[in-house]
Image (cartoon, rainbow, N blue to C red):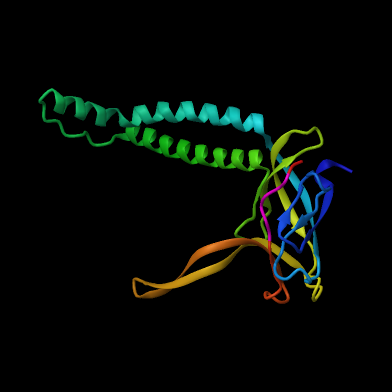
Amino acid sequence: MSEKQQTQHNQVTGGSVGGIFNGGNNGTIVVNPGAPENPVQPYSARVVMNLPTQGALATTAAVITIVTFSTGWRSLTPLIQVVNGLREGRDLLPPAPGDSQTYWLLALFVCIVALVAVFAGLRHVRNQTFQPPRLSTLPALAGVTDKRSRKRLALVRFSGNCIICNGQLRFYDKPVEWHDEVINGRRKRIIDRREPAAECKKNPKHWYPMDITDLIT
């Protein structure tokens, strides 16, 4: 059986989480949705795709940081020239951005987005946590430890059936607090807080909060 096909069994019931991916308690998660007498809700975690290791992410972050500084310097050159001109007593207006300048500004934006994404991935790998998707049809992004004891990113899918009604569970970043606002004459729901959750598809009232923290011992 390949690494991607291996399934780990977890359970939702109590108030702590441990070793969801190769952790110290054989991949068992415990999350408390309520009183201790609530039944244990089991589910499984399966790695569907391995992503870069911590070392590869760190190297990528370093390269992107250098490129970001370079593109930033090129993008801000006209503004720097205007500031220097004002210091020398010359009244200079910033030139209209040409095709080249637009290119550097776009490159800077792309670099900043990529840098934020890589650092977010590094945070999950270092802390061994997972980020559930907004849509339950998508896999979760998780920091895992593979068979060679290397920390890395991975795409993970959870699965299970509700212990109360045997309905299929879905796993996503569930909205738990929201408010309505009127924007441009239309009422719009604004999500204030989300919480990782395992929710029954038959009865949404059957749902359990999940702890994203993976305790590595």
From what the image shows, is residue 87 above or below residue 133?
A: above
Residues rendered magenta in the picture: 210-215
Image quadrant in which you'd find residue 169: bottom right
In this rendered view, identify the residue nearer to me: 104 or 175: 175
The image shows residue 152 at horizontal and vertical percentages of 69, 37
From what the image shows, is residue 91 above or below residue 5?
A: above
- Label the magenta part by its dominant secondary structure: loop
The image shows residue 60 at horizontal and vertical percentages of 58, 30
Image quadrant in which you'd find residue 94: top left
How many numbered marks does the figure carry? 0
Asked if residue 136 shows in the view, the reply is: no
Question: Quick one: quadrant of the N terminus?
Answer: top right
> Which residue is drawn at the image coordinates 77% and 60% (left, top)?
159
> Which residue is drawn at the image coordinates 19% and 25% (left, top)?
84
> Which residue is drawn at the image coordinates 76% and 41% (left, top)?
217
Residue 59 falls within the magenta-colored stretch: no
The image shows residue 68 at horizontal and vertical percentages of 44, 31
